[in-house]
Amino acid sequence: MTLTPKHAQDSLIRMTELVLPNDTNTFGNLMGGRLMYWMDIAAALACMKHCSAPVVTASVDNISFETPIRLGNVVHIEAQVSRAFTTSMEVHMRVWGEDPVQQYRYKSNEAFMTFVALDPNGKSRAVPPVIPDTEEEKKLYDGALRRRQLRLILGGKMRPEEAGELRALFFENVKS
């Protein structure tokens, strides 16, 4: 079965949340776990939009919290599928905080998550390929294979010597 490729931009999800007292830690900052929960929802929505099927989280790459988001601030999350493989999709996430009183926006973090599409029996199913259009989408698309190889190595599902794209970053004259 051949699936019709879809443009990366077509999977874009923008989600907005207000940081309330129940979302914060004792310092008045948004709890990291609450932000990861919101990011997981946004990423799942982007993947479902791309593949028109239910999805499950397969992996979460490193999430570094650059700038805390304060109580009363607004959280903006953007999620977009950067590349699709056979049954999995990598999602690029960007998060900003916004102070609505002072009216300024600041970057909070960026991350990648991977999701797998499911068929009605709960088994993985094929997903449509991604068409990157912008320069940024092409850069994310090209890097996705290396990130995937790294995830597979760290997860014990691939041997380092099998990761040709990743090895080429560190060794000259390596054949993929």
Image (cartoon, rainbow, N blue to C red):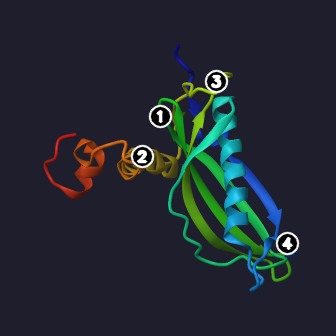
- Residue at (68% x, 29% y) in the render: 53
Q: Residues within 10 Å of mark 2 (few under 14, many from 20)?
A: some
Amino acid type indicated by mark 3: Asp
Q: Secondary structure at mark 1?
A: loop
- Farthest residue, direction bottom: 27
Residue 40, numbered circle: none
Identify the secondary structure beneath mark 4: helix
Cα distance in 3D space between marks 4 and 2: 35 Å
- Real-space CA distance between mark 3 and mark 2, rounded to the nearest whole angstrom: 22 Å
Quick one: SS at disc 2? helix
* Residue that badge 2 annotates: 148
Q: Amino acid at mark 1?
A: Phe
Horizontal and vertical percent for residue 33? 68, 65
Q: How many C-alpha atoms fall within 10 Å of the one at disc 4: few (<14), some, or many (≥20)?
A: few
Disc 1 from disc 2: Cα separation: 9 Å
How crowded is the residue under tag 1: few (<14 C-alpha within 10 Å), some, or many (20+)? Answer: some
Q: Which residue is mark 4?
A: 22
Who comes first in sequence, dot 4 or dot 3?
A: 4
Residue 44 in the image: above or below residue 30: above
Q: Position of residue 135 (x, y in %)?
A: 48, 50
In the image, what residue type sits under mark 4?
Asn
Q: Could you tell me if the residues under marks 1 and 2 are in contact, i.e. CB atoms within 8 Å? A: yes
Q: Earlier in the sequence, mark 1 or mark 2?
A: 1
Asked if the residue under mark 3 is in contact with the one under mark 4, i.e. CB atoms within 8 Å, the reply is no
User: Whole-Å distance between the Cαs marked 4 and 1?
Assistant: 38 Å
Q: Mark 3 against mark 2, which lies toward the viewer?
A: 3
Q: Which is nearer the N-term, disc 4 or disc 1?
A: 4
Label annotation for residue 119: 3
Using the rendered view, name the quadrant where residue 120 is placed: top right
Q: Badge 1 is on which residue?
A: 85
Q: Is residue 113 left or right of residue 159?
A: right
